[in-house]
Amino acid sequence: MADNLTVKISGMDDLKRVLSEIPEQMRKKVILGALRKAARVPLQIARREVPIMSAASAAKNPYRTAGLLRKRLTVRVSKESRKAGNLGVFINIKPAAGAKYSTTSTRILGAKIRNRTLKKSSDRGAKSPNDPYYWRFVEFGTSKMAAKPFLKPAGDSLGEALNVFLAEVVPQLEKWNKRK
């Protein structure tokens, strides 16, 4: 399976203390902007490293789209971090869209009745050329296929991404401190 990746960063307590003094709205704007910019470093490496299916292989397999993994690599805001009261971003493969429903409610004799109508069917599934669910098999390998990691090499660039983050955040913090 996957190897563990450990990153040690010093000075985070001081940075957290300084950031906690900034108003929340500005903190979100400054930090999320810097996190997104820093995340572009590993994102570019992952895009460079992701294997692309050959045209011959694509012709044999009608359920796969050449270049789909590269196209779906993206930086996303972490909902888990937001729920915990923190800010965070991560790089992953954006999944295909699920089914879309519309719900209407009506009252008949005082009882509320909900009607769910399918607006758009799901793009997910093994036979959908738009679903990149198989990224796990490419990254970690299977019993029949060797791993071709592209996210792990991207993770090795986290030190460089931290430098980009600090280069973005420090001037903003200095500007904020001058206002005080």
Image (cartoon, grey):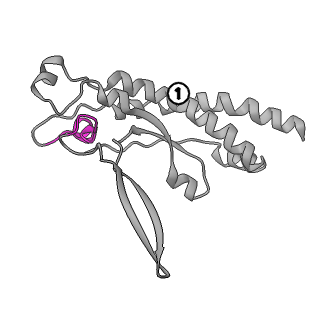
Q: Residue furthest right?
A: 180
Q: Is residue 73 magenta?
A: no
Q: Position of residue 6 (x, y in %)?
A: 43, 43
Query: Looking at numbered disc 1 in the image, what kind of residue is underneath it?
Result: Glu
Mark 1: few, some, or many residues within 10 Å (few <14, many ≥20)?
some
Q: Nearer the viewer, residue 129 or 154?
A: 129
By secondary structure, the bulk of the magenta-drawn segment is best described as: loop
Q: Is residue 46 left or right of residue 128?
A: right
Q: Nearer the viewer, residue 59 or 35?
A: 59
23 horizontally vs 143: left or right: right
Check the picture and name the quadrant holding the C terminus: top right
**Residue 132 is covered by the magenta coloring:** yes
Numbered circles on residues, count: 1
Spot occupied by residue 23 in the image (x, y as percentages of width and height): 78, 48
Q: Residue at x 49, y 33 (%)?
A: 158
Does residue 41 appear to the left or right of 47 in the view shown? right
Q: Which residue is mark 1?
A: 160
Give SS at disc 1: helix
Residue ID at (89%, 37%): 179
List the single residue furthest toward the top.
Answer: 55
Q: Position of residue 79 (x, y in %)?
A: 51, 52
The N terminus - image quarter: top left
Residue at the image point whose x is 73% and y is 49% from the top: 24
Residue 19 location in percent, x, y? 72, 46
Q: For this rendering, which residue is in front, 27 or 17?
A: 27
| Residue at 9% across, 25% down | 60
Tell me where the magenta segment starts and ends, as one range: 128-142
- Compared to residue 104, the image places residue 107 above or below, namely below
Give the residue at the far front of this rendering.
109
